[in-house]
Amino acid sequence: MISAQAWADAQRLWDFQQMGHELRPCSVAIGLGSHDLGVADTTADLYHRGMMPLIVFTGATSRTTRDRMPRGEAEHYRERAMELGVPADAILVEPRAQNTGENIRFSRALLTDQQTAVSSVLLVSKPYEERRAYGTARKLWPEVEWISASTPMTLTEYVESIGDARTVIDMLVGAQHRIMTYPKLGFMTDQSVPDDVAAAFERLRNAGFTSRLV
């Protein structure tokens, strides 16, 4: 049973971890691999809306995806996008990345190899990963403009899609821990964390939502 306080704190983290960027056409989209095929769905939708001419799907497998996506996250994303009408020649696959930093570095290398001119990138992630992905991308590839995107949905809708509220709150707490820790390690740009968000994180951590901490 999730307490009312935990729900309220999870909502604070959910709201903070999304960037709220206004979408506009970009040179390319990079879809970050994960367990969530919704990233592929949203990327395909953005393509059909004319937001970019080219997509890079990036990701190998992890302990949470190797059974569901045995051919690799990026390859399963590519297949899903093609099912949704994105042409094969509009998709590049980066199959090696195993973390967000590698997603960005390997995608950049692939685009360089393809001689693709990039001035702006739509960075498509899970909703609660927007801020961490943005901070990582800005750190590793500061020369381009980054616009964050994810499936528009509420926290309640996301919990329903995953089917486990505790797992989702654990993921929110883990993402927040990285936002607060990784800048000191040089992995991402510093993100100013409001006091109420930091307090919500501490309460959730103290309440035992710790399985995804760094």
Image: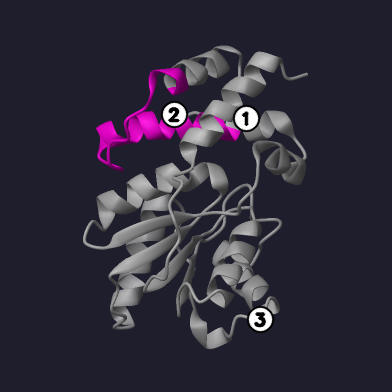
Identify the mark nearer the N-term, 3 or 1.
3
**SS assignment at label 1:** helix
Q: Amino acid at mark 1?
A: Ile
Identify the element where label 2 is drawn: helix
Pointer 2 or 1: first along the chain: 1
Closer to us: 38 or 186 = 38
| Image quarter (top left, top right, bottom left or bottom right) of the N terminus | top right
Q: Nearer the viewer, residue 44 or 111?
A: 44
State the extent of the magenta-drawn residues as a range. 171-197
Apparent side of residue 139 relative to residue 11 in the rendered image (left or right): left
Q: Is residue 193 left or right of residue 20?
A: left
Direction left: furthest residue: 143
Residue drawn at 51 percent across, 19 percent down: 200
Badge 3 local density, few (<14 within 10 Å), some, or many (20+)? Answer: few
Q: Which dot, 3 or 1, sits closer to the camera? A: 3
Q: Residue at x 71, y 37 (%)?
A: 156
User: For residue 169, which numbered disc appears in the image?
Assistant: 1
Q: Which mark, by number, is residue 85?
A: 3
Separation of marks 2 and 1 at Cα, in angstroms: 12 Å
